[in-house]
Image (tube, rainbow, N blue to C red):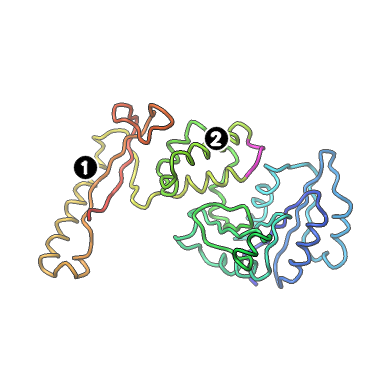
């Protein structure tokens, strides 16, 4: 197996769960496995877990934290550290049981650049292997998903740079409204997620996965988003209009010459869509009124 991928097992004070994970990980051949254990407030590590670091599990790289990182700091700290040495990282927490086949498959999947139909910021999720998923799916497996899943996941160094533990509540609307997957959510879901994002904006150390979900939404741009401008008189808008007029004229001529079923005949003509951005009259308002606009997002849309 290539040195491109590290496997991180993160835990705290549950030796029985750590041991169960180790028994599975020892069977994953040629894997670079790191076991990171957070300490308590006094800097102490569970003695039973320390005992596991010798003997048959001594080949793993053990990291005993000397200062408590907590729920919000442990995993981001270790992922950042490992991705300074490796191209990819798979993360497992001690209470998520993942089969060997899933780990090996995930390592192979991460060995190449993630395709566009995966998360924009490069994560795949696995399902927690419990009674429910065993009945529903029959076995543990990973899946490509647009949404972040903390039940075992992986990322690549180039996309981890987009993660930040610090969120700015004043930028929520601006950063999320361009997201293709955010726009799919109903208003109730958006309000619920914004509450979660506000929690970590106010208390960044509360957790780490809300920030990861935010990064997922923020970086999933709509495929037809072009640019943002401050004025409707921006010359970039005029330039884009000229390009679209020329493109549409070419397609229309091609349809006449080669027919609607030809390659060019099947191409759709396109137009501009400009959306005002700025203060909304209420949290329930879907869009910014034109009179409230402080800037504008410019999109290209297909005509049927």
Assign the N terminus to one quadrant of the image: bottom right
Q: Residue at x 78, y 63 (%)?
A: 22
Q: Please tell me whether residue 215 is drawn above or below residue 16 in the rendered image.
A: above
Looking at marks 1 and 2 on the same chain, the residue that comes earlier in the sequence is marked by 2
Tell me the number on the disc at residue 15: none
Foreground pick, 53 / 12:
12
Q: Secondary structure at mark 1?
A: helix
| Residue 82: % across, % down | 67, 55
| Quadrant assignment, res 293 | top left
Reading the image, the residue beneath label 1 is 238
Tell me the number on the disc at residue 195: 2
Q: Is 223 included in the stretch rendered in magenta?
A: no
Foreground pick, 125 / 229:
125
- Judged left or right of residue 195, residue 246 is left
Bounds of the magenta segment: 204-208
Q: Please tell me whether residue 199 is drawn above or below residue 73 in the rendered image.
A: above
Q: Secondary structure at mark 2?
A: helix
Closer mark to the observer between disc 1 and disc 2: 2
| Quadrant assignment, res 268 | bottom left
Q: Residue at x 22, y 56 (%)?
A: 304
| Residue 199: % across, % down | 60, 34
Q: Residue at x 45, y 41 (%)?
A: 176
- Judged left or right of residue 153, residue 24 is right
């Amino acid at each position: 197996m290539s040195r491109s991928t590290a496997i991180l097992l993160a835990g705290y004070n549950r030796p029985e769960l750590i041991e169960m994970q180790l028994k599975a990980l020892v069977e994953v051949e040629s894997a670079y496995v790191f076991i990171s254990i957070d300490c308590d407030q006094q800097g102490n590590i569970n003695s039973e877990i320390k005992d596991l670091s010798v003997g048959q599990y001594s080949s793993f790289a053990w990291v005993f934290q000397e200062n408590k990182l907590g729920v919000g700091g442990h995993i981001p700290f270790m992922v950042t550290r490992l991705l300074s040495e490796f191209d990819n990282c798979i993360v497992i927490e001690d209470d998520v049981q993942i089969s060997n086949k899933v780990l090996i498959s995930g390592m192979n999947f991460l060995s190449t650049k993630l395709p566009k139909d995966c998360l924009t910021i490069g994560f795949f999720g696995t399902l927690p292997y419990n009674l429910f998923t065993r009945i529903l799916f029959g076995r543990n497996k990973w899946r490509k998903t647009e949404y972040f899943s903390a039940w075992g996941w992986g990322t690549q160094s180039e996309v981890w740079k987009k993660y930040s533990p610090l969120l700015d509540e004043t930028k929520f609307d601006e950063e999320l409204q361009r997201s293709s997957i955010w726009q799919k959510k109903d208003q109730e879901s958006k309000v619920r997620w914004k509450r979660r994002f506000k929690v970590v904006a106010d208390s960044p150390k509360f957790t780490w996965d809300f920030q990861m979900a935010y990064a997922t939404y923020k970086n999933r741009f709509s495929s037809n988003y072009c640019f943002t401008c401050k004025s409707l008189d921006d010359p970039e808008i005029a330039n884009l209009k000229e390009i679209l007029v020329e493109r549409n004229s070419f397609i229309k001529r091609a349809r006449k010459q080669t027919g609607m079923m030809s390659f060019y005949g099947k191409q759709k003509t396109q137009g501009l869509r400009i959306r005002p951005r700025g203060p909304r009259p209420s949290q329930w308002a879907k869009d910014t009124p034109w009179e409230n606009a402080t800037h504008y997002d410019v999109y290209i849309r297909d005509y049927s």
